[in-house]
Amino acid sequence: MEEETFSLPLSQDTFQDLWENVAAPSISTIQTTVSGNECWQDGSLTMALMDMPYDEDLFNLPSELPNKDGANSSCPTVPVTTDHPGEYDFKLRFQKSGTAKSVTSTYSESLNKLYCQLAKTSPLEVLLSREPPLGAMLRATAIYKKTEHVAEVVRRCPHHQNEDSTENRSHLIRMEGSQRAQYFEDPHTKRQSVTVPYEPPQLGSEFTTILLSFMCNSSCMGGMNRRPILAILTLETQEGVVLGRRCFEVRVCACPGRDRKTEEANSTKMQTETKDAKKRKSAPTSDSTTVKKSRTASSAEEDDKEVFTLQIRGRKRYEMIKRINDGLDLLENKTKSKTTYKPEGPVLPSGKRLMHRGEKSDSD
């Protein structure tokens, strides 16, 4: 059988014209392997692709390619910081440690705050009520706590970044002990996060442990710069759907035990002062005013009865002060006599006293 020859038109036609004008070879001249060793020998099969109409979007790539391993690193502009256990009852638990100066990390339940040292691992226990979907992961993200700073991205300070030679040296949070940890930076918000695949608890255990480390102090200039931060830990599917969320405050310092003890004491003191202020506002003021008035009146009476001795130098000064004292005594006696005098008999409206029969008036 003679082989058919094909030649493309020698013109500057568009790709659409080329698609429509090119001739399809006979199916008998093409051998297609199926399952490794079988060939299509039936001439009734036609080339479906060559009979398809031209489509302009045939060779266009999709606008968004799926991320590697199916991990979705997209992040909202302002992440939510409220706890949400979800249908899997997602919980976090910190190992108990005191406030000794030697501890490298300690957690305060009353403040919901983690205190840890720079680049020291903090064990974190993850508890779920049932097994999550296959491929679930844990994501850790850091944001600033205060409203005026929440739009900024939490990064390491330039000093610690320059000292670090790793690829992810700008990330504040790291997950240690896992070779499958992946670091992401959202292309729109520039927020950074780190993920590790969720591992089910080992035999005889009810929780899974992850190791977090924070690579900058809270006081670093050019970094956090003494601004409080929050760590958000989420349980997500392989496609990035959030199944649960937990949030806690973090302070990276040189002495976690001391700082925790100090801040807990200050918080307790503020709560006590607030309660006392509320009690003072709710207490009745009339009783206290009456008590003050009665105390003032009684003290004034007691002061009038007291006798004082005054030493005076010089005769003239003594005579002058004695006259002042005599005058005050005379004035006090007149005031008392006016208040105690009561006229005999009924008093007329005009102020004159009614005279009895046989009584003479003062004019007589």
Image: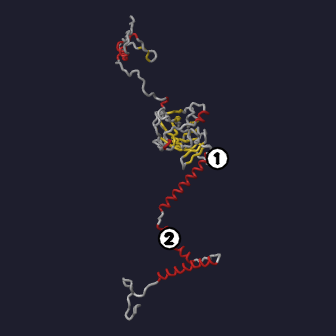
Q: Which residue is mark 1?
A: 101
Left or right position of 10 against 232? left
Report how far apart the C-alphas of labels 1 and 2 lie in the structure.
55 Å
Q: Quadrant of residue 349?
A: bottom left
| Residue at the spot 41% in from the left edge and 21% down from the top edge | 59
Residue 151 shows in this picture: yes
Image vertical order of residue 16 relative to residue 222, above or below: above
- The single residue placed furthest to the top in the displayed view is 2
Of badges 1 and 2, the one in the foreground is: 2
**Residue 299 placement: quadrant:** bottom right
Q: Residues within 10 Å of mark 1 (few under 14, many from 20)?
A: few
Q: Nearer the viewer, residue 187 or 19?
A: 187
Residue 45 at least partly seen: no
Circle number at residue 293: 2
Q: Can you say whether 277 is above or below 127 in the image?
A: below
- Residue flagged by tag 1: what amino acid is it? Lys
Mark 2 element type? helix
- Give the amino acid type for the residue marked by disc 2 in the picture: Lys
Q: How far across and down, in percent of the image, does residue 303 sit?
A: 56, 75
Q: Residues within 10 Å of mark 2 (few under 14, many from 20)?
A: few
Residue 106 at what x, y percent from top left?
59, 45
